[in-house]
Amino acid sequence: MSDLFLGQTCTELYKFISAGTAHTFTFSFQPDKVVFNNLSDWTATAAGKPISVWFRDQTTAAHAFQHQVIDSAAGASFNFLDTAADGFTVADTAGGVSSRHATISGITQADPCVVTHSTFTFQTNQVIRITDLGSDMPVARGMDQLNNNRYRIVVLSATTFSLKDVITGEPIDSAAFTAYVSGGRIALETAVISLNNPQVSPYDVTPYVPNPFAFDPVEYKLTAGTAVMGSDGDIFNIEVYKFGEVIDLGDLLV
């Protein structure tokens, strides 16, 4: 992957006192590694767990890789555990720009070309871009001629619109286009055309609410379970890392 942080690692440190129960933490970036240091357990008697580690994309999200004290003499030696329950759970919230996208479920070979889409409140004369179609996809999806093009639309129903040339306004004739197979996305490229388009009557009672141009950011959250959070009153710090670059070397064959 590319180095998004100009060769530098993003890090954060959090401090807290545990309530002895599971807790969800929100971070300001997507972490690659999180280390929970239970300072109260650092020199604990046997069975204390001073360190719990989470790695992004590990095989089971509920696991926690932990050090466990096995020598009561000042925590001098450790077991290394893979806690299979009550460890970590990814709790990221959904986000992105879904408010500006719809998925395609059908496209006609006709004049004019009509697109059937997932529920979304489009307006006549808005400009959209069609993507993720054509024979270049892993599985051919058809309608190669529409892929990555911009069109002006005419709303026909809650889930259909026809296409017009974005410059001339002429209807798009898709009769000879490659037949639609599946998939495809619609990206909205224009703002609201009119506050009452499509017409809502009476406007002052049920005004039209347009699709917003808003970016909904992902919130990166990690829930630490009771196996990590220790006892009520335990003192913690959390080290959070985002690596400047991650390289997957795969299986090193001899």
Image (tube, helix red, strand yellow):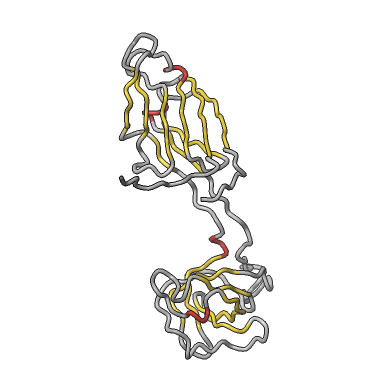
From the viewer's perspective, tell me whether residue 192 is left or right of residue 108. Answer: right
| Residue 83, placed above or below residue 164 | above
| Residue 113, placed above or below residue 6 | below
Residue 153: percent from left, percent from top? 59, 79
Q: Nearer the viewer, residue 123 or 181?
A: 181
Q: Which quadrant of the figure has residue 213? A: bottom right
From the viewer's perspective, tell me whether residue 129 is left or right of residue 54. Answer: right
Residue located at (44% from left, 42% from top): 56
Q: Quadrant of the C terminus?
A: top left
Q: Which quadrant of the figure has residue 67? A: top left
Residue 74: percent from left, percent from top? 39, 10
Q: Nearer the viewer, residue 180 or 251?
A: 251
Residue located at (47% from left, 37% from top): 33
Number of disc labels: 0
Q: Which quadrant of the figure has residue 181? A: bottom left
| Residue 47, placed above or below residue 105 | above
| Residue placed furthest toward the top | 73
From the viewer's perspective, tell me whether residue 240 is left or right of residue 228. Answer: right
| Residue 218, placed above or below residue 151 | above
From the viewer's perspective, tell me whether residue 21 is left or right of residue 171. Answer: left
| Residue placed furthest toward the front | 254
Residue 224: percent from left, percent from top? 43, 33
Residue located at (56% from left, 62% from top): 99
Residue 170: percent from left, percent from top? 62, 89
